[in-house]
Image (cartoon, helix red, strand yellow):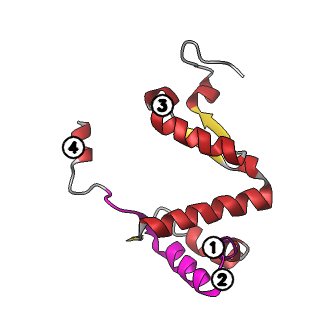
Amino acid sequence: SYSWYLYSANRVKYPMVRKRLIKLWREAKAQHCDPVDAWASIISSPEKTKSYKQARGRGGFVRSSWSEVNEIIAASNVFTAKEFGPDRIIGFSPIPAMSMVSYAAGARYLSLIGGACLSFYDWYCDLPPASPMT
């Protein structure tokens, strides 16, 4: 049941980040005062980008702080919006009707920055009753 996941000793209790990425981030932050510049230094280097992307699927996660992961997320969003346009920031919700509170918070954020909201409803054209089709 769901409670087994919720109360399991193996559940994720704090932010976890891929070890290679967090190492690159901390090095970049030491060299750049601005978090967006730090993120840009990682993304603009093919070697750095390849090094953390190749680690996908191999585990290797380490514990981080909420402030650090929020800074990475914010820096990557700002960088993406500046470099490629805000419409390249996509939020995805499998079924928005299941949790309107969480969906609404994300949709509001994306709307404010010019991002796009996507869901399974967009793919399957299976909208709930009274949902506007735009």
CB atoms of marks 1 and 2 within 8 Å: yes
Q: Is residue 84 above or below residue 119?
A: below
The residue shown at (60%, 40%) is 108
Q: Which residue is mark 3?
A: 100
Q: Which residue is mark 1?
A: 35
Instruction: Pinpoint residue 55: horizontal percent, then vertical percent.
Output: 51, 69
On residue 96, the disc is none
Give the distance between the C-alpha atoms of the residues marked 4 and 3, in whole angstroms: 24 Å
Give the distance between the C-alpha atoms of the residues marked 4 and 2, in whole angstroms: 43 Å
Q: Label 4: how many residues lie within 10 Å, few (<14), some (14-19) or many (20+)? A: few
Give the distance between the C-alpha atoms of the residues marked 4 and 1, in whole angstroms: 38 Å
Q: Label 3: how many residues lie within 10 Å, few (<14), some (14-19) or many (20+)? A: few
Quadrant where the N terminus is found in the figure: top left
Q: Which region is colored magenta?
A: 12-39
The residue shown at (53%, 80%) is 26
User: Label 1 sits on what residue type?
Assistant: Pro
Q: Which residue is mark 4?
A: 4
